[in-house]
Every structure is written in C-alpha cells, then in structure tokens.
Image: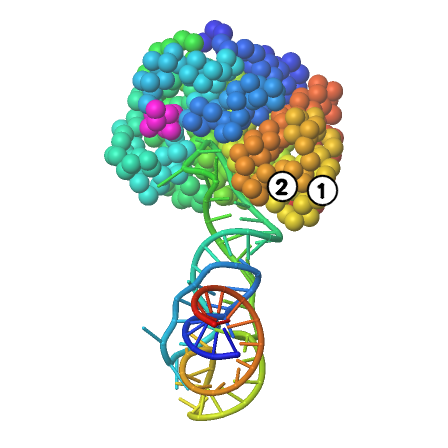
Amino acid sequence: MENFYLEIKHIDKKTKARCGILHTPHGNVEIPMFMPVGTLATVKTLSPEEVKQLGAGVILANTYHLFLRPGEDIVAKAGGLHKFMNYDGPILTDSGGFQVFSLQDNRKISEEGVTFKSHLNGDTLFFSPEKVIDIEEKLGADIIMSFDECIPYPVSHEYAKKSVERTLRWAERGLLAHKRSDQALFGIVQGGEFEDLREHSARALSQMNFDGYSIGGTSIGEPKDVCLRMVDYSLKYLPESKPRYLMGVGSIDYILEGIERGIDMFDCVLPTRIARHGALMTSKGRINIKDAKYKDDFSSLDGECDCYTCKNYTKAYLRHLFVADEAFGKRLMSIHNLRFLIKMMEEARKAIQEDRFLEFKDSMIKKYGDKRGF
RNA sequence: GCGAAUGUGGUGAAGAGGCUAACACAACCGGCUGUGAACCGGUCAUUCGUGGGUUCGAGCCCCAUCAUUCGCC
C-alpha cells in the first residue's frame, strides 16, 4: 500500500527503541504511540475533538462490536467510520479475534472460522477471515487487523501449535480477500509463550508482506516475564521496516518495556476504563479518587500534567463528581489518564531522539516502582 | 391524662424460640491491560431501646420501664 508506510527517524543508541512517523491516508502520526480505544466508534465519554486535542494519533474501533451494532452496512452507508464518527484522523479496526476469545463459552472454532453467539441477543453468528476483512473494508479504517485466534494462557504446546498454524492460514486468506488499496492490513503474531511457535508465526507472517505486524496473545493474565518473552520471541523475526504493534498493552511499565524492544504502537482500554472507575495515573503513582482523603483536597490531580482536567479542576471536585456518579467526572478523568499516557509517549520519543531512552525508562519506573503498577 | 401501634447497624429493613442476625443502600478499601466492563470484589450489628423474668436455648414469649408515632380528652 502506497500511502501507508513507516518512516523511522532515529533508533536509540543503547536500546532498540525507535521513533519516527507513520504515514496513513488520514494523516501522519508519530511513533511510538498510544492509541485510545473506541470500541463502538467512540472513545467512551469523549468527543473526537477532545481525543485529538490530547495528542492521540490513532483511534481504535472494533469489528465485532460494530458488526453487531449498528452493522457494517450502516457504517458504509454513512460514508465509512471517519464520517460516521466525525473523526478525520487515522482509525484502526481490531478484527474481533480477541472478542471471540473473550466469548470463550459461546464459540466454536473450526478451520473455516468461528461460530459464536452474540453477547447482545444470543444470535448464532459466524466469522471467517474473509468475512472479517469484508466487514473491515466496509467500516473503512486506515489500518485493519487480520482475524486471529487469541489463545489463552496457559495452554499446551500442542494446542498452541495447532492454533498458530490455523491463524497463519487465516492470515493468508485475509490477505487474499483484502481488496481496498487505501487500507493497511496487519498480521498478528501468536504462539503463546513458546519460542519456536512465536518464531514460526513471525517468520511466516513476515513472508506474507503485510503492511504492519502486531503481537497478540499477551496481557491475558500471564506473568510479566512471560509477556516480555513472548514479545522478544516475536519481535526477533519481524521486519524492522514495518510498524510493530503490541496489542492490548497499556500499563506504564509494560509500554516502556515494549518501546525499549522496538514496539511502535500500543492500545489499551486501561486508561479509559480505570478512569471511569475512579483510578487515575499520576506522576506520583496511581490514585483512587473515591478515597475519603480527597474529600477536601483542593489541589489538582497532578501538578506535572498539562491536561484540561488538571489545569481546571481539583481532586475534591473530581471525587464529588465520581461519588455522585456524574458523567462529567468520568469524562474529566478519561481526559487526564489518556493525556498522561500520551504525554509519556511524547517524552519517550524525545528521549529516543536524544539517545537517553534507558534513563528515561528507569526514571519513570523508579517513580512508579514502589507504587502499584497500572 | 387515657388508649393503640412501633422500637433490630449510618439508612431502609428481613427475622413469628434453635447453628456465626438475611438482603439492599450508604460508608470505607481494592481491582480492572486488542472494552460482553459507568463494572467486579472485599470490609462494615460480639448484638436486636433499657432492666428483669420464663426456657437447655430469647431479636422472637412474659413483666416493668423509657422513647417515638397516631387517636381521644
């Protein structure tokens, strides 16, 4: 695909961390980046303008959810996702592989695809790699993901192998089915915690010439060292010239570990979800705004933050809004958490440019080291 | 002053003689990682207005007392 490519500007001298620009049909974005999740074609509680103001490069939306409601044909009729949700920046659609994984009890996997039951009304439905690509083409995101099976952890080598092989065949089928030339298609490395399978998956996908590659199957309850091993095994065999996307990772330490290893893109529901539930990422660690100690704390959330929330509101007010279950509170806290992560990415890019990513990472981790991880 | 009803945690209350007083809300504290998620989990009455009695055993039965509410003077 022509108008989609990664321009690597600099690689940190002491690590594999890299920074640069990802060119997409809806604008250029800097990497490494964090992508806010807007499953249902909206980052919950925020307007597209707000998301943009936070400095977010890409918004994620979900094939599975939009297929169920309102349906890809409605979105196509609206003129595609960008018009439908009034966002002119780059959009990425996840394939639904992860959703099918979380539907575990209500699905059946075969060579052809996955039969599953809608979580909305119990309808029996079917996804094949071709069907998913067809939906994603109708949705019209800039980056689309191929349909994969996200295997659980732990899992036997035997099952992981069988699954990886099938996911590779699905990747190939998706690639063949993909017709639109204005959408980048990413392949997804799987293979559980097994080095040989990750290698096989990454090598095989690399030969298929996707526009980018992502690492899937992490952040599903495995210990941190296992997660990082899976990333290492996968990354080793992926082409350096293409964007690399670590799916579903959004905690501060994991993101930094990922960047150090050469990951360019991250997405996660964590910042927005925990914000709606009253947890905030601050330069002093995580805080739960509902704690009684903030009842009369009229200081800002985070003195080092430049977001709208921190510049204009106090902890006491945020706590009040949260306790009173006011929508505005969830919005203010989502703004903050997203800005916090996005700002961290901005600082990480700068650190990479200046060959001091390791120092940056260590100082960040030191700040959070004794606190609970996000 | 007389009559009636009711007294269980911060609140609304279950509980009609038998294990550690249900449940909900509030409060307090956690968690959430390609959003089935404005969700989930934990803690929260050594004690039933008070005092006495009956009973192997009482929040539940009896007596007294206090309080509250309603009705009548």
Does A20 appear in magenta? no
For the image, the number of numbered tags is 2
Query: Dot 1: few (<14), some (14–19), or many (≥20) neighbours within 10 Å?
Result: some
The quarter holding residue A138 reads: top left
Tell me the quarter of the image containing the N terminus of chain A: top left
What kind of secondary structure does the magenta stretch mostly adopt? helix
Q: Which residues are magenta?
A: A63-70
Percent coordinates x, y for residue A232 in the rendering: 55, 32
Tell me the quarter of the image containing the C terminus of chain A: top right
Q: Is residue A263 above or below residue A117?
A: above
Residue with the mark numbered 1: A297
Asked if both marks, 1 and 2, belong to the same chain, the answer given is yes
Q: Nearer the viewer, residue A205 or A289?
A: A289
Instruction: Name the residue type under label 1.
Output: Asp
Residue with the mark numbered 2: A319
Mark nearer the N terminus (1 vs 2): 1
Q: Nearer the viewer, residue B65 or A158?
A: B65
Q: Callout 1: helix, strand or loop?
A: loop
- Name the residue: 60% across, 28% down: A335
Residue B60 horizontal side relative to residue A55, left or right: left
CA gap between label 1 and label 2 equals 9 Å
Percent coordinates x, y for residue B20 in the rendering: 48, 73
Q: Nearer the viewer, residue A362 or A141?
A: A141
- Outermost top residue: A2
Q: Is residue A335 above or below residue A315?
A: above
Q: Which mark is residue A133?
A: none
Q: Callout 2: helix, strand or loop?
A: helix
Query: Dot 2: few (<14), some (14–19), or many (≥20) neighbours within 10 Å?
Result: many
Asked whether the residues under the numbered discs 1 and 2 touch, taking CB atoms below 8 Å apart as contact, a structural biologist would say yes
Residue A314 horizontal side relative to residue A244, left or right: right
- Name the residue: 56% across, 42% down: A324
Instruction: Name the residue type under label 2.
Output: Arg
